[in-house]
Amino acid sequence: MSGQSHWLARCRAHLIGLAVCATLAGCAGSPAYGPVPAGSYRVQSGDTLYGIARANSVSTADLVRWNSLPDADRIEVGQVLRVVPPPGSASAPATVASSGGTTPPARPRAQARPSKPASKPAPAPAAPRTATNKIPMTWPATGNVLANYNGSSNKGIDIGGKSGDPIYAAAAGKVVYAGNGLRGYGNLVMIQHENGYLTAYAHNRELLVKEGAAVAKGQTIARMGDTDSHGVVKLHFEVRQKGTPFNPSDFLPPR
């Protein structure tokens, strides 16, 4: 399954999970996830693998290995990660065997004391990915940029404005998702474009298109809002190619 298809599949899996929650537990308002097993952590909006590793005093390399992650740069909101070593793991703290002789062991000199295990070297940074066969895009909203892409905590750009401002399709394509089932994105539209590109438009007040609809470049697809954005009216806009996020500013014309 390609990275892009995997991302879309996760969106639909979230929708199914929310529907079950509403039926069995009578959930109302924003969706809630169930408890996670001991030694695990559920990814929240804005989390990075580095931040989760640091909070649990482990390395990102450990988290990648323990959770069989194919890409350390891609974790999803709602994903459950093991944050402690699995049984028998080489990363589990080792114990020092005691002496079994009848004579008490000599007091070790200071330099002979067992030293703390050296921390593993940080993995070398992955080579930056390059978008291929770029397609020209238009700005999806007219407001000022509130937050820029950084590739970790923000995998898109945030554009400000007033509630109800129009949101435009950045390029022609087909609507592959329109709903509010992906936690942290609110009312969300995703559009599939040529050359494997996908654009996402989050936190809308109102959606004006449905899944399967063909849209033209510059067509109004939603109204700006603050759903699942902590009360801040804005558009969160992402550009991905085969599941990999890229800086939207590299595709948009200068203002």
Image (cartoon, grey):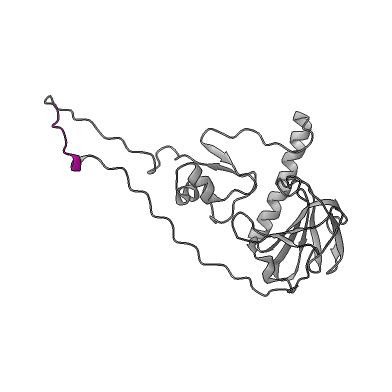
Residue 108 visible: yes
Q: Quadrant of residue 110?
A: top left
Q: As displayed, is residue 126 above or below residue 98? A: below
Residue 202 visible: no
Residue 8 image offset from top left, x and y in percent: 71, 54
Q: How many marks?
A: 0
Furthest residue in direction left, as rendered: 103
Identify the residue at horizontal 22%, vertical 30% (top origin): 98
Q: Which residues are magenta?
A: 104-112
Placement of the N terminus among the 4 image quadrants: bottom right
Identify the residue at horizontal 80%, vertical 66% (top origin): 173
Q: Quadrant of residue 16?
A: top right
Secondary structure, magenta segment, majority class: loop
Residue 150 image offset from top left, x and y in percent: 61, 60
Compared across the picture, whether 31 is left or right of 105 comes to right
Whether 209 is among the magenta residues is no
Whether 106 is among the magenta residues is yes
